[in-house]
Amino acid sequence: MIDPASEGTASPASLRVLRKRPQFLALNRAVRVPAESFLLQARDRGDGDPVIGVGFTCSKKVGNAVARNRAKRRLREIARLELPTRGRQGWDYALIGRAEVTAGRAFEALRDDLRRALAKAHDKAGG
């Protein structure tokens, strides 16, 4: 088990889970960065709210309910560990699982994928 205190993450209050369809639709029109184990969508909300929004989705292509839930749990954990320090305040992010990859990829490789994807998304968005 990873000790959150040793990760140097910010308080969990800095992340907000996206739950409403319009939030995901807005992300669908934003920057898209394919990573090896998932697709990252990112956008600057521009509303002045410093909270980081994050959403997760896995379609039935990822597998049965057990595989989808495992993939989402893993995506939630890498987001919890990486977004408070590498995400930008006022941005929303969506992590979309990939079939047969997200649930089975090594955890550290998943984290590396998110770090690289975040850097690319921020570069594409203009700094």
Image (cartoon, grey):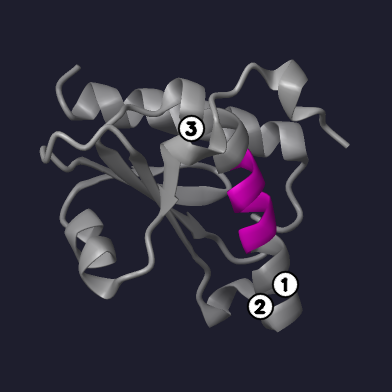
Whole-percent x and y of residue 52? 36, 39
Horizontal side, residue 25 vs residue 115: left or right: left
Toward the right, the furthest residue is 1
Labels 3 and 1: the sequence-earlier one: 1
Whole-percent x and y of residue 48? 14, 34
Mark nearest the camera among 3 and 2 is 3
* Residue drawn at 37 percent across, 59 percent down: 18
* Residue drawn at 50 percent across, 76 percent down: 59
The 10 Å Cα crowd at callout 1, few under 14, some 14 to 19, many 20 or more, is some
Image quarter where the N terminus lies is top right
Structural distance between the alpha carbons of marks 3 and 2: 26 Å
Count of residue discs: 3
Image quarter where the C terminus lies is top left
Structural distance between the alpha carbons of marks 3 and 1: 24 Å
Task: List the residue tagged with mark 1.
Answer: 67
Callout 3 amino acid: Leu
Mark nearest the camera among 3 and 1 is 3
Q: Which residues are magenta?
A: 72-78
The dot on residue 63 is: 2
Whole-percent x and y of residue 36? 55, 43
Task: List the residue tagged with mark 3.
Answer: 83
Structural distance between the alpha carbons of marks 1 and 2: 5 Å
Horizontal side, residue 62 vs residue 57: left or right: right
Callout 2 amino acid: Gly
Q: Main secondary structure of the magenta part?
A: helix
Q: Element at badge 3?
A: helix
Horizontal side, residue 54 vs residue 59: left or right: left
Contact between labelled residues 2 and 1, with CB atoms less than 8 Å apart? yes
Q: Is residue 32 above or below residue 9?
A: below
